[in-house]
Image (cartoon, rainbow, N blue to C red):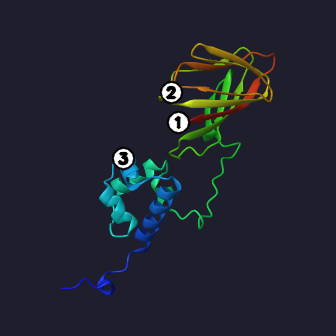
Amino acid sequence: MTDDPSARPAPDPAGRVLSERVTALRQSSSFTLEQLAAASGVSRSMLSQIERGQANPTLAVTFRIAKAFGLTIGELVDDPAASGLIEVVRGDDPTSLFRADPECQIRTLSPLHMEKNVEFYELKIQPGASLDSAPHFNGTRELFTVTAGQAAIVTGAAECTLAAGDSAHYRADVEHSIRATGEVALQGYLVVTYK
């Protein structure tokens, strides 16, 4: 019996999209198949079959590949050129309030449902109050930009002061705090990045 390519079933559209996306993402990330296998926990041979459109991976395998690229499964299989999705976080949406009390208000500016390596927040801290945080995951960093008021940033044994327009980038895998040191409420934007 000969292997006649015309006798093989045509690859399904979803398999073709996954094949093309994994190949494109791997190449744009400058990963070899071995590196992607190590990052995802999926064997090199399975990844090779997926890229050639010869495998139909399980949901668990697809999830591990997506995580290796820092994506959700939906983002992995979605064609970014064809996607017309725009997600909006409305300013008056009460579900975007992470914390709201007389001393501090934290509002998330990134969609809550996303699996993400980056979080984006708007902060308002009353004079004399602070946002004190326990250590986050190893390798976590924060970038805080002041838009109004004055701040003291303390991370581990290091401390700095900021005025409107200033930004600080610091470790957040140790105890850290943002304190409002001026006479008016501190306002700013906080970006948290995870490795």
Please tell me in which quadrant of the rendered image residue 98 appears.
top right
Q: Residues within 10 Å of mark 1 (few under 14, many from 20)?
A: some
Residue 67 lies left or right of residue 151; in this view the side is: left
Note whether residue 58 is visible.
no
Q: Residues within 10 Å of mark 2 (few under 14, many from 20)?
A: some
Residue 125 in the image, given as x and y percentages of width and height: 71, 23
Query: Would you name the residue on which mark 2 appears?
Result: 136
Residue 85 lies left or right of residue 38; in this view the side is: right
The N terminus, quarter of image: bottom left
Note whether residue 128 is visible.
yes
Q: Earlier in the sequence, mark 2 or mark 3?
A: 3
Q: Secondary structure at mark 2?
A: loop
Q: Earlier in the sequence, mark 3 or mark 1?
A: 3
* Amino acid of disc 3: Ala
Please tell me in which quadrant of the rendered image residue 19 appears.
bottom left
Residue at left offset 49%, top offset 53%: 30
Query: Would you name the residue on which mark 3 appears?
Result: 38
- Residue 165 vs 126, above or below: the answer is below
